[in-house]
Amino acid sequence: MKHCCSLFILLALLPGFAAGQSLDVSAAADAIEPSVIEWRRDFHENPELSNREFRTAGVIAAHLEGLGLEVQTGVAHTGVIALLRGGRPGPVVALRADMDGLPVVERGDLAFKSEITTTYRGQEVGVMHACGHDTHMAILMGVAEILAEHRDELAGTVKFLFQPAEEGPPEGEEGGAELMVKEGALKNPDVDAIFGLHIWAERDIGTIGYRPRGMMAGVQDFRIKVHGVQAHGSAPWMGIDPVVTAAQIINGLQTIVSRSVTLTRDAAVVTVGSIHGGVRSNIIPEELEMIGTIRTFSEEDKVLVHRRIREIANGVADAMGASVEVEIPFSTSYPVTYNDPDLTAAMVASLERAAGAENVSVIDAVTGAEDFSFFANEVPGLYFFLGGKPLGQSQEDTPSHHTPDFHIDEAGMKLGVRAMLNLALDYLNNYPDKSVGGR
């Protein structure tokens, strides 16, 4: 259920409404920038996969403990929560950063390039921060240090959430934001609002993008097993070919978005990302497995796409004489990342003060997914994109997220510090008395 913030917030946080602190946000961000860059490079050089962020968690916990915060470790396996209690009573605001890297071999010639390898799904793989989570952690560590230095001025409490397994836990394990919520990360004390950011390689540094309501898609993965009858490759009529059946299923799945989803309302995606079957050129295998991803922006479309995948897979298999097993979700299911519209409208002034109004814009919905959505389903949330592309570099020349050449311009991280500071301070200072009309 989505919660709405009180109209009192909207009135309190009109553009230009000052944070009311002695803290100079810009000067503090300038001063902390060298440390943020150093932390980011350390994380980048030492990435860890989901639910295995042991070193990462240790570095974060040691830093937060050194600031005198109340630190809890081992949350959702490797997560870290730190509590900063202000000098005056007030609301509780949560700030979140994700921690995990990806099974990607890094290319390029960075001095702090990752050379880490590990085993993933039985294969030897490289590990890389190929999505920018290293920058998220470093930014939030900087924010924590600045706020800790001014704790006596804060009216309320800041809860720092360093979350593992945003990219999804290993098969057979729980993890990520969903498990953090289950384990009470938003409780004791109860969080009133949560903010998060994602650095974005395709946006210029110095800019911020946001969107009220559906910001990023909901996601589920799927697995389809196709069962046929094995035969010699020279005599296909003696078997039932799961490879040809799978090819027809894949073609059919591509019609779901183009022919079943109301595209004038919302976008959707159905992608088959992996297909495995057979061992030799002259053997028709007995079975085949394919896995893929689904992206939708509404519960209605999610139900529709799931139904059509099952119908198409079973219908094609019946026509080919084969059989299928369809699992949805297979291992991952995140809701839509939803920005509370009242909270978003109230906090735009904070983002504009950090970046300049001309550098803050409403963006189109993104078919990527984020498990920040689990937090924002529990309390009002605002999630935004922070520019990470070097100025003057074209989007065509910018490697995308989750690729071996992914990179960001570290000069963009300082804006992330300013933005998160403004959001936290403005919310803490201007949140209404709950007895008058808060959430």
Image (cartoon, rainbow, N blue to C red):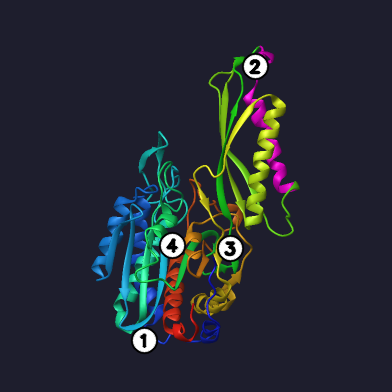
Q: Position of residue 399 (x, y in %)?
A: 54, 51
Q: Name the residue that disc number 3 marks.
A: 215
Could you say which quadrant of the image residue 429 lies in?
bottom left
Q: CA distance from mark 4 to mark 2?
A: 57 Å
Tell me which amino acid carries mark 1. Answer: Ser
Mark 1, residue position: 22
**Front disc: 4 or 2:** 2
Q: Main secondary structure of the magenta part?
A: helix
Residue beneath label 4, please? 410
> Can you identify the residue that label 2 sits on?
239
Relative depth, front residue between 415 and 216? 216
Tell me which label, 3 or 4, sits earlier in the chain.
3
Disc 3 residue type?
Met
Magenta stretch: residue 49 in it?
A: no
Quarter of the rendering containing residue 67: bottom left
Circle 2: residue type = Gly
Rendering coords of residue 247 (x, y %): 67, 31
Does 361 appear above or below 251? below
Q: Earlier in the sequence, mark 1 or mark 3?
A: 1
Q: Number of labelled discs? A: 4
Instruction: Give the SS element for disc 2.
Output: loop
Question: Which tag, 2 or 3, sits closer to the chain's start?
Answer: 3
**Residues in magenta?**
235-258
Spot occupied by residue 421 in the image (x, y as percentages of width and height): 42, 75
Alpha-carbon span between mark 2 and mark 3: 48 Å
Query: Quick check: marks 2 and 3 in contact, CB under 8 Å?
Result: no
Q: Local crowd at mark 3 within 10 Å, few (<14), some, or many (≥20)?
A: many
Where 155 falls versus 97 (above or below)? below
* Picture residue at 70% right of the left edge, 32% below the top: 316
Nearest to the observer: residue 30 or residue 299: 299
Q: Which label lies toward us, 1 or 3?
A: 3
